[in-house]
């Protein structure tokens, strides 16, 4: 059973319209409230980082949208990770080294840290903005000064946890 969850299809590069349509389908798997929160968070990140590439992974546990200066996941500022009833803001490669005086970041791994996004208003909190700004400074390859980033569907896992809210997810 675990092997089936690890099999991913790596889609061919899609046109921008086809990639948007596929991402819309991924988001449509969620409850209406979660869809709204994820779309709003994505809109904020697109406004803040218009030149960042969006790397999308529709994984077993999460739908992940990374905002990266290149087409490599290791060049991500951060990522939105959505599961049934929750939205996290992840800092997968530099989270452990980010300054966090307000102690808002969770996790204890060697690299990754995250915070829960209860509302898109969380992005306007000064301590959240400070962590995001610090993550931008840690980028090995800086964001392009102009242009528009691409939406790239990186992986789709056919077997996934339900994207609709379950009581056990909401309580964590």
Image (tube, grey):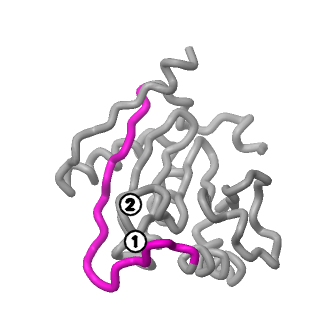
Crowding near pointer 1: few (<14 within 10 Å), some, many (20+)? some
Residue 150 is inside the magenta segment = yes
Marking on residue 54? 2
Instruction: Tell whether 55 sits left or right of 165.
Output: left
Instruction: Tell whether 31 sits left or right of 118.
Output: left
* Residue denoted by label 1: 46
SS assignment at label 1: helix
> Which image quadrant is residue 171 in?
top right
Position of residue 98 measured from the top left corner of the image (x, y, whole percent): 70, 72
Report the predominant secondary structure element of the magenta stretch: loop
Q: What stretch is highlighted in magenta?
A: 138-158
**Sequence-earlier tag: 1 or 2:** 1
Q: Residue at 26%, 48% (x, y): give it.
A: 21
Say above or below: 116 vs 26: below
Position of residue 169 measured from the top left corner of the image (x, y, whole percent): 70, 39
Q: Residue at 40%, 77% (x, y): give it.
A: 143
Depth check, front residue: 38 or 81: 81
Q: Are the residues tagged 1 and 2 within 8 Å (C-beta)?
A: yes
SS assignment at label 2: strand
């Amino acid at each position: 059973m675990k092997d089936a969850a690890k099999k991913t299809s790596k889609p061919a590069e899609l046109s921008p319209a086809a990639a948007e349509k596929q991402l819309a389908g991924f988001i449509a798997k969620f409850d209406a409230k979660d869809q709204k929160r994820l779309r709003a968070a994505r809109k904020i990140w697109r406004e803040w980082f218009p030149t960042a590439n969006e790397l999308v992974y529709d994984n077993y546990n999460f739908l992940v949208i990374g905002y990266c200066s290149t087409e490599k996941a290791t060049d991500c500022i951060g990522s939105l990770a959505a599961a049934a009833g929750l939205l996290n803001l992840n800092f997968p490669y530099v989270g452990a080294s980010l300054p966090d005086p307000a102690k808002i970041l969770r996790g204890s791994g060697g690299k990754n840290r995250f915070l829960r996004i209860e509302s898109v208003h969380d992005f306007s909190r000064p301590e959240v903005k400070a962590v995001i700004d610090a993550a931008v400074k840690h980028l090995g390859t800086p964001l392009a000064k102009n242009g528009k980033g691409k939406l790239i569907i990186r992986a789709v896992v056919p077997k996934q946890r339900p994207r609709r809210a379950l009581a056990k997810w909401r309580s964590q």
